[in-house]
Image (cartoon, rainbow, N blue to C red):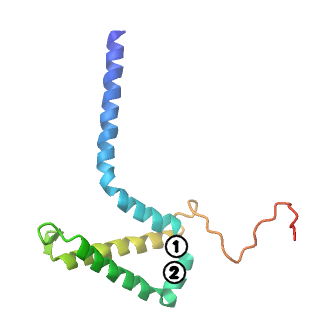
Amino acid sequence: MENLLNSLLELIIAVWNLVESLFHLILPWTPLVAWVAFWLLAVNWVKYRAVLLKGGWTGLAFIGLIMIMIWGLIAPPVDGVHHVFGLSLSNFVGKTVYVTALFSIMFLCGSVQLSGACGSLICFKHADEEPADHGHAAVH
């Protein structure tokens, strides 16, 4: 019986170590996971695409430009250059690569949502729909 309890205790310690290791592995990726979750599940890409096609892309481009400029001024790299894919990029060029990658992920999330791949996860209410009447009389 003592061997069983010792084995059970070792198993609990091993599972705890596994959970702790997975937590430390996933923790640095949580901002990117939040970015993907927002653009995949919280944005109605049918409406957003219509806004972008009517000229909203210029505002999006300006937001990206401002992101690059502010991020480059606030957080320059420690050694003065970014190391991306084996290349040494200057501060603002590196930030441009990062912001372009974030925008690419954003548009990939939009294309996944527009393809209908996550249709069971989201349900956006259209503005032109009437609210459902559940048998309650309207008070005027």
Q: Is residue 123 left or right of residue 40?
A: right
Q: Nearer the viewer, residue 76 or 25?
A: 76
The image position of residue 128, as x and y in percent, is 70, 78
As helix, strand or loop, the secondary structure at mark 2 comes to helix
Q: Nearer the viewer, residue 90 or 39?
A: 90
Q: Is residue 55 left or right of residue 17?
A: right
Q: Are marks 1 and 2 in contact (CB under 8 Å)?
A: yes
Residue 49 is marked as 2
As helix, strand or loop, the secondary structure at mark 1 comes to helix
The image position of residue 87, as x and y in percent, is 14, 72
Q: Quadrant of residue 104?
A: bottom left
Residue at the spot 30% in from the left edge and 23% down from the top edge: 10
> Identity of the amino acid at label 2?
Arg
Residue 30 is marked as none
Residue at the spot 36% in from the left edge and 62% down from the top edge: 32
Q: Quadrant of residue 36?
A: bottom left
> Identity of the amino acid at label 1?
Leu
Q: Is residue 97 above or below residue 20?
A: below
Residue annotated with mark 1: 114
Front of the two marks 1 and 2: 2
Residue at the spot 51% in from the left edge and 64% down from the top edge: 41
